[in-house]
Amino acid sequence: MFEIVAPGSTIALVLVLSSLLLTVTLMNPYSKKWNPRGLHCYVTGGSAGLGLALAVILAKKGAHVSIVARDEEKLRIALEEVEKARQNPEQILKSYSYSLTEAQAAEDALKAACEPHGGKAPDAIFLCAGTARLGYFVEQTPESLQNGMNISYWISAYTALAYTKRIVQEKKPGKIIFVSSVMGYMSFVGYTTYSPAKHALRGLAETLRSELLLYKSSVHICFPCTIYSPGYIEENKTKPPITLKIEETDDGQTPEQVAEGLFRGIQNGNFHITTALVGSIFRCSTRGATPRNNPLLDAVYGLIGHIGLPIWRRSVDATVKAHREDHQKYLRGRGILT
Ligand SMILES: NC(=O)C1=CN([C@@H]2O[C@H](COP(=O)(O)OP(=O)(O)OC[C@H]3O[C@@H](n4cnc5c(N)ncnc54)[C@H](OP(=O)(O)O)[C@@H]3O)[C@@H](O)[C@H]2O)C=CC1
Ligand SMILES: CCCCCCCCCCCCCCCC(=O)[C@@H](N)CO
């Protein structure tokens, strides 16, 4: 029976399917753009890097902004930056000093930030706080592995939990934005204290995207590549040279570029948000049942990944193998190998 399908009808079928996909894209139910004007946005890690860049954008859009981090001096300087972006005298712009790797502190920080807003939960929370401290697995301890989860997973999960309890109580639709990394899609040498936590954030976001539909609330998660932030300068001081070398292929973005991309992604209603080409390729190569951003474009990114990623991974593996001898020397130098 198959021989009766002429090439012409195959083309027609492809055309019909493509236009159907296009229609679905254009009929995107989220197409009404999210506007933070007059809304309370809570930004963790808002004193530096991506969090600060986002806080500035949100203030420029007329939002009330609360930034949270530990160091009070950094917070004070950051709040001055956010103040410069103020659009009207009604905007409430505030900073809070808490260490968000503790569940109680995460709850307390959120409570404190609710107070100037009549005790009401923020309209959106941006979970940017996070740190990467990298190294070889063989040099880790049970404590350092747990710390990795604290500074990259629990730091966001605790706030998401405290926030969810509030919005459910208040019967208020909420919005949670997680920040993972392309290292939450894949990984390579050096990232055992970080990549698992960023993968875990994806798992949490996938679950919450579904579960928070119960409360008319939305969830987004961003997967940036290299961000030239203060944190990045710090992490590179202890990053294994082999890891640095593999990352050389990544052009990197400024915190402002990533914040812009993240903001656009939220406006477009994208669940997984990538702000660079490489990020989009990984996103579309590991999507599973994750909602697509653009069915046509995502298929193209997926195709590029299907062809390009195995080639890239082979080159990464070759780089690692070529490093074996140097690594033996390193291990002896550190007294790990005798
Ligand atoms: N930089 C990069 O290359 C990439 C980063 N990411 C992710 O993006 C996010 C932002 O990164 P980046 O801009 O580099 O971050 P920075 O390290 O530049 O800034 C981190 C912010 O988080 C705060 N913070 C850190 N620890 C805590 C804590 N325990 N409690 C409260 N606040 C804390 C810091 O303030 P303080 O220290 O005073 O508390 C600071 O405000 C992170 O989640 C990171 O993992 C993803 C991909 C790439
Ligand atoms: C056709 C396909 C080509 C693929 C090229 C892939 C290049 C990948 C480079 C990896 C970049 C790693 C960024 C880590 C960001 C991060 O999370 C840390 N800085 C921690 O803060």
Image (tube, helix red, strand yellow):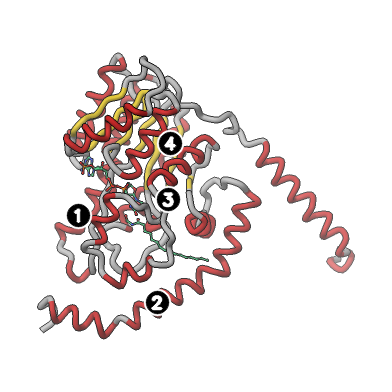
Residue, x 28% and y 42% (percent of image)? 48
For the residues labelled 4 and 3, say whether their Cβ atoms are less than 8 Å apart: no
Quarter of the render that holds ligand 2: bottom left
44 or 193, nearer to the observer: 44
Quadrant location, the C terminus:
bottom left
Instruction: Return the mark for residue 223.
Output: 3
The answer, for residue 167, to whether it is visible in the render is no
Q: Is disc 1 placed on a helix, strand or loop? A: helix
For image coordinates 40% across by 77% down, the residue present is: 317
Q: Which residue is mark 4?
A: 211
Q: Do the numbered discs 1 and 2 sit on residues whose CB atoms are within 8 Å?
A: no
Disc 3: residue Cβ within 8 A of ligand 1's nearest atom: yes
Q: Earlier in the sequence, mark 1 or mark 2?
A: 1
Task: Residue type at mark 3: give it.
Answer: Phe
Q: Which mark is residue 317?
A: 2
The response on whether ligand 1 sits within 8 Å of label 1 is: no
Mark pair 1, 2: CA separation: 27 Å
Distance of mark 3 from mark 2, alpha carbons?
23 Å
Task: Report, in whole angstroms, how far the alpha carbon at label 1 lies from the one at label 4.
Answer: 27 Å
**How many marks do you count on the picture?**
4
The answer to whether 107 is drawn above or below residue 135 in the figure is above
Q: Could you say which quadrant of the image residue 179 lies in?
A: top left
Q: Secondary structure at mark 2?
A: helix
Type of residue at label 4? Glu
Residue 38, percent from left and from top: 42, 20
Is residue 134 at least partly visible in the picture?
yes
Mark 3 and mark 2 lie on one chain; the one further toward the N terminus is 3
Q: Residues within 10 Å of mark 1 (few under 14, many from 20)?
A: some
- Residue indicated by mark 1: 146
Compared across the picture, whether 265 is left or right of 40 comes to right
Residue 119 pos. (x, y %):
28, 17
- Of mark 1 and mark 4, the one earlier in the sequence is 1
